[in-house]
Image: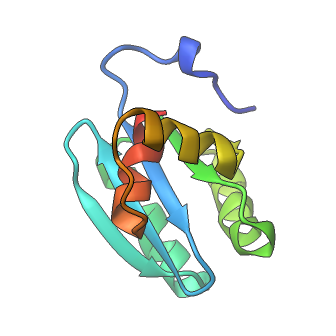
Amino acid sequence: MAQTCSNLESNAVVIGIDVSKDHLDAAQYPSGDLIQTSNDTKGLRTLLRWIGRQHAVHVVFEATGPFHRQLESHLTKAGIPFSRINPRHARKFAEATGKLAKTGRVDARMEALL
């Protein structure tokens, strides 16, 4: 079961992931560390190892139709708590914070803050 933001500690490490057809951009909060992997089995294994090294307590990503499903499955199997969010809500949050650029890295950072 995914944790809600209110259940996370103030010093929690959160990973935001921007999902696209071909790749995954991930950003760690609060450090800002970044990684990009392919959105396939090999890339997901790399991403999960990176998440483990970050000692993440929660992962956030947008629902992207068929492109997020494999990520969600791998996170579930690994027992990593996550939140799948509405892309419109993520975009509104980015607009409210003045981050209007639409790139994978910027989106991943914004999702880590949600």
The quarter holding residue 21 reads: bottom right
Q: Position of residue 30 (x, y in %)?
A: 25, 36
Q: Is residue 67 above or below residue 42?
A: above
- Please give the name of the residue rendered at 35% of the width and 41% of the height, measured from the top-left corner: 55
Q: Can you say whether 23 is above or below 82 in the image?
A: below
The percent coordinates of residue 101 (x first, y second) are: 36, 60
Extreme right residue here?
66
Query: Is 48 or 18 nearer to us in this picture?
Result: 18
Q: Is residue 109 left or right of residue 3?
A: left
Of 70 and 91, nearer the camera is 91
Quadrant of the frame with the N terminus: top right
Residue at the spot x=56%, y=40% of the render?
Answer: 92
Q: Position of residue 28 (x, y in %)?
A: 32, 47
Query: How many numbered marks does the figure carry?
Result: 0
Query: Residue at position x 57%, y 81% from top?
Result: 39
- Observer able to see residue 51: no
Counting from the top left corner in percent of width and height, residue 87 is at 66, 51
Q: Which residue is at 50% across, 36% downward?
A: 93
Would residue 11 be visible to someone looking at this image? yes
Image colouring:
rainbow
Residue 50 vertical position relative to residue 8 in the rendered view, above or below: below
